[in-house]
Amino acid sequence: MTSSNGWIRRKVLIAGVLIPLFVHSSCYADDLRIGVASNFRSTLEQIATGFKLAHNIEVEVSAASTGALFAQVKSGAPFDILFAADSIRPALLESEGHTRLRRTYAYGQLVFWTPGKPANETTLKQYKGTMAIANPRHAPYGKAATDTLELMQVKSDRVVYGTNIAQAFNFVRTGNAPAGLIALSQIKYMNVPAIEFWVVPPESYAPIEQQLVVLKNASMNAELFVAYTFDPGTTRLIEKSGYLVSDTGNQPGTGADR
Amino acid sequence: MSLSIQARVIREGGFELNVDVAFPDREVSALFGASGSGKSTILRLLAGLDHTPGIRVSFNDTVWQDDSTFVPPNQRHIGYVFQHLNLFPHLSVSGNLDYAETRRQSGGGLSRQDLLDILNLSSLLEKLPRQLSGGEQQRVAIARALLSNPDLIVMDEPLGSLDQAAKDRILPYLQRLHRSLEIPIIYVSHVLDEILYLADTVFEIADGKITGESSVIDFSVSGSHINQPEAAAIVSCRVRSENEQYSLTELQFEDTQLLVSAGQLINGELVRVKIPARDVSLSRQRNETSIINVIATTIEHIHDPGTGASAVVKLKCGNQFLLALITRKSLQELRFEIGESIFAQIKGVALMTQHDS
Amino acid sequence: MTDSDLVSLWLTLKLAGATTLVLIVLGTPLAWWLSQRSHSSERGWLRNTLQNIVEPLVALPIVLPPTVVGFYLLLAFSPNNLPGELWQSATGTTLAFSFYGLVVGSAIYSLPFYVQPLQVAFSALQRELIEAAATLGASPLDRFFSLIVPLSRRGFIIAICLSFAHTVGEFGIVLMIGGNLPDETRVLSIALFDHVEALDYGKAHVLAGGLLGFSFVTLFLLYAVDRRWQNGTRTT
């Protein structure tokens, strides 16, 4: 009798250790895992820090391109929230049934940057040299840039595409392109002197909507984080980083497709 | 005095070459020594293939190398025959010859047809090197070297990778060439037979130093190599007359005569005769014997190594010498003495190069 | 394939061709120099040391991520730095975002694929053959073209095919410095990447499949030719 009791006890002990490891239900997990598009990473990390202090919940941030995050989620990566740099991929995820919430958290702002030279509407309209922008075919800032160039009738020598806005920024930073249409958030992050850049009026281009999605099986703390993101203190932080939180010109969207 | 080299070179592993030598013009100079004695090193330095500083090489009036000059090998007009790996594998025999011919130095020299005839290459022209035997490859290599019309020929153990039969076939070609050419030939080998066959002057080399310089005649009968079974005396004779009845030729050797098988010889011509030591036996009397050449000589020297079966006796005849290889037993029993008059019985006599005096 | 993809195809072939030509001109002497190792210790000391440094440098692009090479190239090409400045004053344009810039980048990146097979072929040559040619009156340049090149044919073929094929597949460098200009720097690998980023998988399949097929056919032919060579000639 004793041996069979001992045997059962051992099994229960093993089960007690192993089973919790296999429990997937995120309702039991406290940590939040967030995927963020690279260009919003530094801002999100600041938000996450604030959230941790306020709610005492651990947050793990992974940064990658929106496309990479999109592919990872579709392959089952265990994110709770995705902060994308556009609205197309979030919409796709929603239509395929991966999400339970989708909201616009920020609007990107386009700036005209000419290092070492003053930048304003006139200099943009008159600019003739090489212009670096993000690839309009798949990068949100790129489409905004081409909209702007068309509207302002800029006749630049040639327009070079960075594969994303970060690369466009790098082209200008290294001096290979004398000018570029890039993100205000990058300008702020790099402390570029005010005289070198000019914020393009948002009505010049279709809004650069950046949306977040909460994934279907996310932790219950995910909504808590989303709420925190729209907290006035946080929205101020986001604006300070170079984004708009409610747009001022075109239709505010809950995912207007372009 | 045509080609000279002064070199003091130290190689890795401690080998030191220390030579100061001049090679005579229009002759075959042989460099005779064991493997590793420095023979090939000298040749490579002469040709400029190893550019080593601190040596001096000159040819006729031109300085090929000294402290301030270095003439690269392609400007020295040297015909070089290596022991192997001479022929360009991607070209036929004809192509190999073309290679030399298109870069040929102008001004005389043997023509392509001459060389094809002398070295008997006409049937091989379309073949690739890998389709040739070792002997054929070397003949082509020699022809190609000569086709560039060099001022000097250098051969580094050219028969080294051939078997005995192939060697025997090539040696006559080399002799023929020597007759046809007026340029110096430097011939390197460790094989006594080749040296005796081809050389005019012999430079002995050991441990990186020249240990002797002598005519081939003197060389043949002196030095430690005379104990080798291939030892032979080279003597100089003049052609006297032909004995047609017996197909023999009479040669004047010092005060006496030698009879040899008839060859195409011209009366009055000076010829070299090679008399192998093992074909010479000794007798105190002139007997009735089938051996046709019996010569009166004086014993000059006796080399008894103390062990083994053989000893070598050096014989003087007039101003020249012969060698006799006899058993130590006979030496003991007959008690030959230096200065003694003795008859040398010569069984075989090989005629070698004919040359002008 | 769309028109723009056809342009990309042409650009890709042009880039691979130009890069291979540059490598033939610059890489051949380099491969030769690396293959000539001096055996005597005192005379060859400096040369051996240089060779010991250059050899791994040449091999670097094999192990470095192309992003590293691209990163430094972008800096070098910048008109704010010396190389870019020199180019700009000479030609009036930047090296970045230009076909020439791609050729420079690809030549660096495909360098080991050209130099290494050729270096191996050169090292295998028998010294006596080259010396024999010298004694027959052939100058160093003469020896090179009349003897060394024919005897190293196999090495040349491998080197040329590998560097050509490698450049066709070039992506990382072009991504970093190309700027995606349709008529100048949008090579096939970039076009493919664009299609994927834009979720245009149909077009992506066409290009990816084409590149895969091309690479396979190239290598298949290379091996086949090489086998026939081995059986036919039996030379080193």
Image (cartoon, coloured by chain):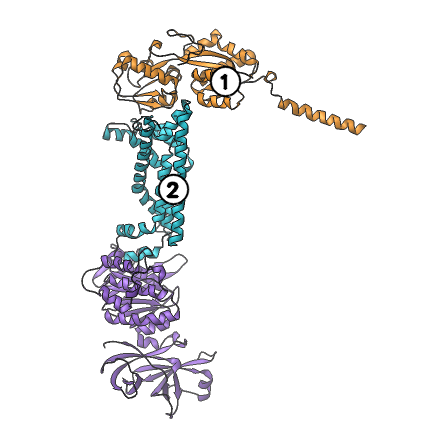
Chain colours: A orange, B purple, C cyan
**Chain name for mark 2:** C
Residue displayed at 24% across by 70% down: B180
Of residues A135 and A258, the one nearer the viewer is A258
Disc 2 marks a residue whose amino acid type is Ile
Q: Which residue is mark 1?
A: A96
Residue that lies at the very extreme toward the right in this rendered image: A1
**Residue C16 vertical position relative to residue A53 in the rendered view, above or below:** below
For image coordinates 29% across by 42% down, the residue present is C25
Q: Which residue is label 2 attached to?
A: C53
Query: How far from the left and from the top, in percent, is residue C60?
Result: 40, 38
Q: Quadrant of residue A155?
A: top left
Query: Residue B107 got which mark?
Result: none
Residue at 47% from the left image edge and 84% from the top image edge:
B329
> Callout 1, which amino acid?
Glu
Task: Point out the image quarter for the N terminus of chain C.
Answer: top left
Whether residue B100 is visible here, answered yes or no, is: yes
- Residue A229 x %, y %: 49, 11
SS class, disc 2 = helix
